[in-house]
Amino acid sequence: MKHLTLETLIAVWEEMFGRGLFWLMTGVAVVVTVAYVFVLLRDRHMSMRKFLLAQLSMPFGAIAAVLFVQGITSSGFRDIGGPVDVLVLLAVAAAGAIGLAILVYTAQSLLRKQD
């Protein structure tokens, strides 16, 4: 593999998660992102109270993402062999943290009226 393309990444993710789960996760991510943009455009400002609560949820998102990926793959924590494995695990944790923060902020904004 000389070039890393989007098609290659999609094929790897489909193989890792399964086609149905991968596209379900992609669909959920798109829906949450559209809802987040809607909330930002509707409110025209970020609520610092909601933002703080969203930030407090980030460690839970990081842990959940790492455990989810470890559960899906056939490897475990004992199989972490080098710096690339650690970097991938940190990237998964960061994505989970950011994703849950966006989800929490959006859910708060959609379910509650203004501060």
Image: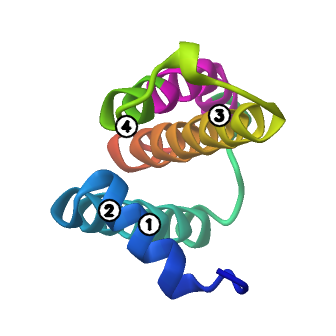
* Label 1, residues with CA under 10 Å away: few <14, some 14-19, many ≥20: few
Camera-side mark, 3 or 2? 2
Task: Please tell me which of labels 3 and 2 falls first in the chain.
Answer: 2
| Screen quadrant of the C terminus | top right
Q: Where 32 sits versus 63, above or below?
A: below
* Residue on which disc 4 sits: 73
Tell me where the magenta segment starts and ends, as one range.
50-66
CA distance separating discs 2 and 1: 5 Å
Q: Where 100 sits versus 30, above or below?
A: above
Task: Please tell me which of labels 4 and 2 falls first in the chain.
Answer: 2
Q: In terms of secondary structure, where does tag 4 sit?
A: loop
| Numbered tag placed on residue 12 in the rendering | 1
In the picture as drawn, the residue positioned furthest to the right comes out as 83
Q: In terms of secondary structure, where does tag 1 sit?
A: helix
Is 56 included in the stretch rendered in magenta? yes
Q: Going by the image, does 9 lie left or right of 93?
A: left
